[in-house]
Image (cartoon, helix red, strand yellow):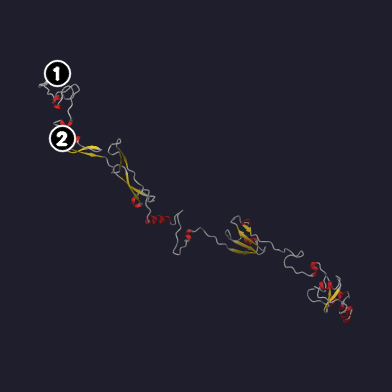
Amino acid sequence: MSKVKLQDNLGRVVNINADATKGAVVGINLYAADGKTLIDPAVFGGDAGGSSVPWDRLTGVPRNLDAFSKISGMGYPVLVAPGQWRMRTFQAGGGLSISNGNGRDGDTTFRLQEVLDTLDGQALVKTTIDQYGRVVATATASTDDLAEGSANLYFTAARADARIAAQKGAANGVAPLDAASKIPTQYLPALAITSTYVVNSQAAQLALVVEEGDVAVRTDQSRTYIQNGGTSGTMADWTLLQTPPDLVQSVNGQTGTVSLDAADVDATRSVVGLQGDVTVTDIADALGLGTAATHDAADFVAVASLATLPNAVDDAAAATAGVAVGAMYRNGSVLCVRIS
């Protein structure tokens, strides 16, 4: 360490590094060991003992430094012009939110502002993104806002018509309609129309040229058959149509057209209930008088008009009158026998 005597009347010296450049000037290019420029203590009105000088007594203070010492307020100092300082604070804007913008209560922090939902209820929404990748706006979108791709084609009337036209009459497609809004027969499956044939024998039935569903009426059997689709050429190709059975199958053992007489139903003929004309012989037999030839008309009338016979309109009245079953009574001038 070397000492350099200052040129003043006080005999003061300045310590310099032994490695200092020779010929260096104090306060200009003479540096201490820490690399700082050595300043003449007289400049500050003090001495090597470390005396201080009030700020307002300093001379030659740079203009900007003097102006800086005079600014006030909270925030960040900004040099706006030579010798002019201003206090600034960070303000929110441009999609940024600012916390502690003047730095008074801590470090200033920045974050992106939230984009409020427009709540328009649309399922399709388009967004606007700024150069920083932020969503800055939303709006209702439509298909006009979507670019059409090679596969996701837009629906148009022309495209729909072309698609339908390509499907008309095609396999697994759609059947077209004619001018009357009917399906043309060429687009319908083969139709089977049922025909009815009347035949009188099995041979005639089997000789018929028929299709499934055709009907054969057999007059010799009073039966009806329907063709079931079989092709064996036998009666197996035909199915007998079921009909409900007749309520009366036979009468007293007789079938077909039945004509009955009293004998057919094992009944005894009597004057009452006889069908057809009643002859003198019938009456004589009913009265036990023998044949009409053995009595003259007077005997017959005398017997038939006996005044003592009860007069009743029917068997029930005769029973009330005391006529026994099998006994005679008269209904006016008609002789009757009570049978019930």
Residue labelled with disc 1: 3
Taking the image as shown, residue 300 lies to the left or right of residue 73, namely: right
SS under mark 1: strand
Vertical arrangement, residue 87 with respect to residue 23, above or below: below
Q: Residues within 10 Å of mark 1 (few under 14, many from 20)?
A: few
Vertical arrangement, residue 125 with respect to residue 40, above or below: below
Three-letter residue code for mark 2 = Arg
Vertical arrangement, residue 335 with respect to residue 23, above or below: below
Q: Looking at the image, tell me whether mark 2 or mark 1 is earlier in sequence order.
A: 1
Corner quadrant of residue 20: top left
Q: Are marks 2 and 1 in contact (CB under 8 Å)?
A: no
SS under mark 2: helix
**In front here: 239 or 112?**
112
Quadrant housing the N terminus: top left
**In front here: 18 or 237?**
18
At x 20%, y 34%, the residue is: 69
At x 62%, y 58%, the residue is: 238
Residue 96 placed where, x, y %? Answer: 30, 42
Taking the image as shown, residue 147 lies to the left or right of residue 8, namely: right
At x 48%, y 61%, the residue is: 185
**In front here: 227 or 23?**
23
- Residue 2 visible, this orientation: yes
Taking the image as shown, residue 249 lies to the left or right of residue 32, namely: right
**In front here: 300 or 171?**
300
Residue 146 placed where, x, y %? Answer: 34, 49
Residue 329 placed where, x, y %? Answer: 85, 75
Residue labelled with disc 2: 63
